Amino acid sequence: DKEPRGKMRALTINGCATQIHDIEEAGAVRTMLLNRHPHLQRLLAQPDIAFIRIAIEAVQMLDGPLEAYRIQFSPDTKG
């Protein structure tokens, strides 16, 4: 049973991604992901895996084809 197209929703998050180069921080991210998602163990064990940090700059929510809501974050609200 499919919902009508008027019920479509979409979330778009815009931001700037940077790679995490610090070995200790990357290890902490890997450990956190393994604890939450143990099924990702083989992926997280790959020697060429990289972790990224995304600074969110804006969020947009589409509620059906006609309603759109956007929040733009100022630089001092990024965390």
Image (cartoon, rainbow, N blue to C red):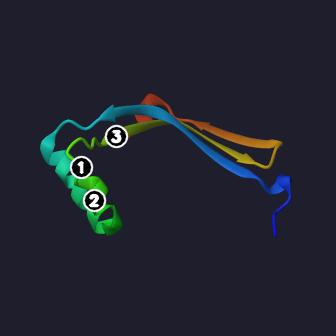
Q: Residues within 10 Å of mark 3 (few under 14, many from 20)?
A: few
Looking at the image, residue 3 sits to the left or right of residue 34; the answer is right
What label does residue 42 carry, if any? Answer: 2
What label does residue 46 carry, if any? Answer: 1
Residue 48, quarter of picture:
top left
Q: Is residue 44 above or below residue 62?
A: below
Q: Nearer the viewer, residue 1 or 24?
A: 1
Residue shown at 16% from the left, 39% from the top: 22
Disc 3 to disc 2: CB gap under 8 Å: no
Residue type for callout 1: Gln
Residue type for callout 2: Arg
Disc 1 to disc 2: CB gap under 8 Å: yes
Q: How many marks?
A: 3
Q: Residues within 10 Å of mark 2 (few under 14, many from 20)?
A: few
Q: Is residue 58 above or below residue 49?
A: above
Q: Nearer the viewer, mark 3 or mark 2?
A: 2
